[in-house]
């Protein structure tokens, strides 16, 4: 659970909801072939659950803002910089607009390229 304080009080948002929202947003961007498992915790989760839709999404809270790390596979032959910029802007917009979350940064790691 991610908790934020505002002038009304404290708001809690489920991390699984945020991970799903971020994953769906990133995968909808042009040039993203898929999300990659990262870290031991996600590796174990991937073994237990074959089709984990939120793999490759890591969320950390820094005061009243969140930091998002994405691990992706991109399609070979496309402009990787443009794909990464698109993901950063779209994830930042969706989190701010739909979840009301302040985003400190979105870090995108291209782990793999595929045809």
Image (tube, rainbow, N blue to C red):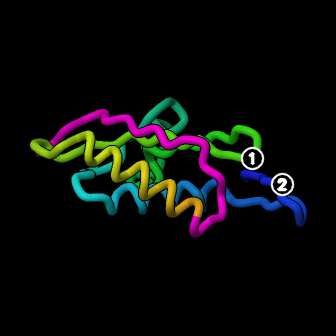
| Residue plotted at (47% across, 53% down) | 54
The answer to whether 61 is drawn above or below residue 39 in the figure is below
List x then y, in percent, for residue 67: 59, 41
**Which stretch appears magenta?**
97-115
Could you tell me residue 82's position as x and y percent? 26, 46
Q: As drawn, is 9 to the left or to the right of 76?
A: right
Q: Which mark sits nearer the N-terminus, 1 or 2?
A: 2
Q: What element carries label 1?
A: loop
Q: Name the residue under label 2.
A: 5
Crowd rating for badge 2 (residues with CA inside 10 Å; few <14, some 14–19, many 20+): few
Q: Do the residues labelled 1 and 2 touch (CB within 8 Å)?
A: yes
Q: In this view, does 42 lie above or below 103?
A: above
- Label annotation for residue 108: none
In the rendered image, residue 58, in percent from the top left (x then y), is placed at 54, 42
Mark 1 crowd level (few <14, some 14–19, many ≥20, 10 Å Cα): some
In this rendering, the answer to whether 102 lies above or below 111 is: below
The residue where tag 1 is placed is 64
Q: Nearer the viewer, residue 50 or 92?
A: 92
Q: Any magenta on residue 53? A: no
Q: Which residue is drawn at 76% across and 40% down?
A: 63
Mark 1 to mark 2 CA distance (whole Å)? 7 Å
Q: What element carries label 2?
A: strand
Q: Identify the residue at image location x=24%, y=58%.
A: 30
The residue nearer to you, when weighing 51 against 86, is: 86
């Amino acid at each position: 659970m991610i908790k934020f304080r505002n002038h009304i009080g404290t708001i809690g948002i489920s991390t699984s909801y945020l991970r799903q929202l971020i994953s769906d947003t990133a995968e909808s961007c042009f040039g993203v072939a898929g999300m990659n498992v990262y870290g031991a915790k996600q590796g174990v989760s991937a073994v237990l659950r074959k089709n984990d839709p939120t793999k490759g999404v890591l969320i950390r809270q820094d005061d009243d803002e969140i930091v998002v790390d994405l691990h992706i596979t991109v399609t070979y032959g496309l402009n990787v910089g443009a794909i990464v910029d698109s993901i950063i802007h779209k994830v930042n917009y969706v989190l701010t607009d739909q979840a009301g979350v302040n985003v400190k940064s979105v870090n995108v790691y291209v782990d793999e390229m595929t045809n």
